[in-house]
Image (spheres, helix red, strand yellow):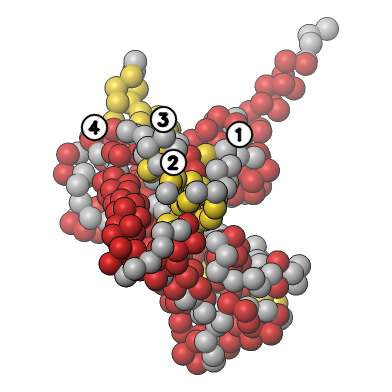
Amino acid sequence: MRTTFRLKNPEAKKETVVFVDIVHATVRTKFYTPITLNPKYWDQQTERLRLPSTEKDDLTMEELEKAINLKLSDIEGLIKKYPLHCLKNDLVESADGLKKYLEAVIKPMNVKQGFVFLVDYIEKSYLPGCESGVITFLKDNQYRRYSKGTVKSKKGVLFALKAFEAERFRIRFEKVDMDFYDSFLKWSEGKGHKINQMGKVIKEIKTVMRYAYEQGIHHNTTWENRKFSVLREDITSVALSKNELDRLMALPLTGTEKYYRDAFLVGCYTALRISDYKEITLDQIKEREGYKIIELTTQKTKAPVKIPIASEIEHILSDPTFYGRSLIEQKLNYKIKELCKRAGINEIIEVVRNNRGMQTITRHEKHELVSSHTARRSGATYLYNIHGRTLDVMQITGHKSERAFLKYIKISSEEVAERMAPKIVNSTKNQLRVV
């Protein structure tokens, strides 16, 4: 009897199943284990998962390696006990007999085919896989783990689907079709959900359905239908101008209000996401010849960035008491609206929404539309206004295309005129000649 652990698809770009290749005399058979893993971490010589040292810096990944290898060792131990099992039960050893023995003990089919409902699978298998790093995604030819923020977003989708099930019906894998799609959209509209909220849930459903399909958990492909589309609408977003940032900076604040304002302003002058500007540490502030920079690796994309520190926030980042404090995004979203209102940021903004197929226009004071992410958009706009070189600013913001960047920033016609005027005037003067 010879057994070898192998991968179902060693060239797979996502997780693939580990199986045991069993050879008894001239008979060969396969036993598929309940274990799936990323092929790039598989060591065929040791027949075990082996993570590179860089991955082991993450305790969760190190624990994952130990857990999976322990499961493989358990299966290997069962295989070694098979001859004794045959002896005790007066059975003849065979490859097929070993396979049935393993199936009876491990019952992998219960793991694979036990999920009838989409929500059960997301809650009990998919989300834990995303959190632990077992489930990854491919970007820029590299396997990446889902960030904490992305996992949190996926949990929000799970919450929405549970709410739908509580009022309508349970979502079976095989019934994720156009009837379900229409039913979910009508339910969402009745709850007053925005178009992009609905689209976010549909997008995640398609992601989970694709992954579960590739894992052999279901055989439904209706979600690939062109009509099973991800809804999306452009939203009205705002950025704060330099004048508005100055007014916010001038507010006489103390305590928590001052900290939340200062943290938001750091985001406004660096174009960092809140996941990054709330975690800045003093040792990330580096001295250069005549200036200072923030040097860090972004949480979402894991990209290293170096950002010159604007004079407006140098006093904030030089204060040791600024660091190590807790910044809760929900509280910041609430507090910054109030502070912007006190700073007189009350320009009227028209917001266009699609509500049950009807276009609606509402008017809001600008401070009502400010959130934690306004800081990043304001920062990108600020850097572009003072620098003007799109590709350089994109090195900081992380945008991949100039088109996406220009769509992201908020440039008013007055700001364009102010930036262009000196160049136009100087160009005109240079062309004049005294005759």
Between 58 and 329, the one nearer to me in the picture: 58
**In terms of sequence position, does the residue under pointer 1 or pointer 3 come before the other?**
3
| Pointer 4 or 3: first along the chain | 4
Residue type, label 2: Trp
Above or below, comparing residue 177 to residue 366 in the picture: below
Graded by Cα atoms within 10 Å as few (under 14), some (14 to 19) or many (20 or more), the crowding at tag 1 reads some
Callout 2 secondary element: strand
User: Real-space Cα distance between discs 2 and 1?
Assistant: 42 Å
Residue found at the very far bottom of the displayed protein: 167
Q: Residue at x 46, y 82 (%)?
A: 162
Residue 283: give its label: 4
Check disc 3 and report its element: helix, strand or loop. Answer: strand
Disc assigned to residue 390: 1
Q: CA distance from mark 4 to mark 2?
A: 37 Å
Q: Residue at x 24, y 32 (%)?
A: 283
Circle 3 is placed at which residue position?
A: 306
In this figure, which residue is indicated by the disc labeled 2? 42
Does residue 252 appear to the left or right of 126 in the view shown? left
> Which label's residue is closer to the chain start, 4 or 2?
2
Q: Crowding at label 3, few (<14), some or many (≥20) Cα neighbours within 10 Å?
A: some
Q: CA distance from mark 3 to mark 2?
A: 35 Å
**Label 1, label 3: how far apart the Cα atoms are:** 16 Å
Residue at (76%, 67%) from the top-left corner? Answer: 226
Q: Earlier in the sequence, mark 2 or mark 1?
A: 2
Q: Earlier in the sequence, mark 4 or mark 1?
A: 4
Q: Amino acid at mark 3?
A: Lys
Q: Nearer the viewer, residue 239 or 357?
A: 357
